[in-house]
Image (cartoon, rainbow, N blue to C red):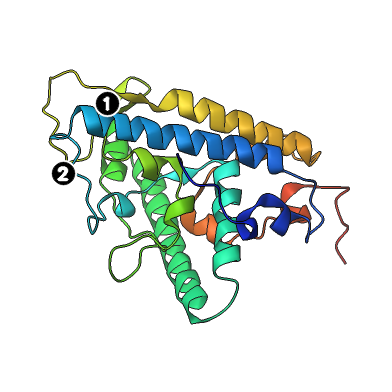
Amino acid sequence: MFPTPPDALRPAAFFEEIMIPDLSAVFEAYERLQMEADAVFARVREGVPEGVRCREGCADCCHALFDLSLVEAMYINRAFLAAFDHGPRRSEIMARASKVDRDLTKFKRDMYHAEKNGEAPGDIMISAAGLKSPCPLLDENNRCLLYAARPITCRIYGVPTAIAGQAHVCGFSGFEKGKPYPTVYLDKIHARLDEMGRDVKEAVNSRFSALHEVYVPLSMALLTNYDERYLGIGPAKKEG
């Protein structure tokens, strides 16, 4: 069972301070999904040990590019603030996050220009899938600095997955092409994450109707201040 985070990582410790409505129920639901993901990974690893080759020191998944749902982004942001509220390590992570975010902006700009120049969308997606960038939470020993709070994608990387009917597996795994294996269907997980995002939007009574549809890379989740302004709590403040 995935351990319950210490009090410093619980929702109230962060959100009460900035006067955001209590989101404990939403984050507890997310933690249950984390535990389910861990359990699924463990079952596949136990059932097909020759296929799952994840080991300490392997950081291939820590270079994959993917976006986080609203609830995941807020959860990792809160865990980061609790673990690294000040000091040189925090500064190092923030500097790496800024660099990764700049690199991702360039990647997206290049893909936009490729589409404008007539490159096929399928080819663009294939190119995007091959892009790699180190996670800002990856330390010098290839270890995650917030392993207990890592996103769902990180928890199931290494076992067969499928999204929108497209299968995927880690290139370092021992799963053989064409053979049937237990598969994690990411569409179902994403649907639950989307629902949790809607729960956040409703709990804070956000004025942003599409708040729950915002997905961001982990680097941006670390750099973002999830305050009343970002979440759209209360009337919009007039500038000037």
State the separation of the CA atoms marked 1 and 2. Answer: 15 Å
Tag 2 or tag 1, which sits nearer the N-term? 1
164 versus 172 height, above or below = above
Foreground residue among 179 and 229: 179
The percent coordinates of residue 66 (x first, y second) are: 41, 45
The percent coordinates of residue 41 (x first, y second) are: 33, 34
The percent coordinates of residue 75 (x first, y second) are: 58, 50
Q: Quadrant of residue 171?
A: top left
Q: Quadrant of residue 84?
A: bottom right
Please report the residue visible at 72 percent of the width from the left and 43 percent of the height from the top: 23
Q: Is residue 113 left or right of residue 208?
A: left
Please report the residue visible at 72 percent of the width from the left and 37 percent of the height from the top: 201
**Label 2 is placed on what type of residue?**
Phe
Please report the residue visible at 16 percent of the width from the left and 44 percent of the height from the top: 172
How many labels sit on residues? 2
66 versus 139 height, above or below = above
Q: Is residue 119 visible?
A: no
Please report the residue visible at 31 percent of the width from the left and 39 percent of the height from the top: 124
**Label 1 is placed on what type of residue?**
Ala
Quarter holding the C terminus is: bottom right
Q: Which residue is mark 2?
A: 172
The percent coordinates of residue 13 (x first, y second) are: 71, 58
Quarter holding the N terminus is: top left
Q: Is residue 186 visible?
A: yes
Q: Which residue is mark 1?
A: 167
Q: Is residue 139 left or right of residue 204?
A: left
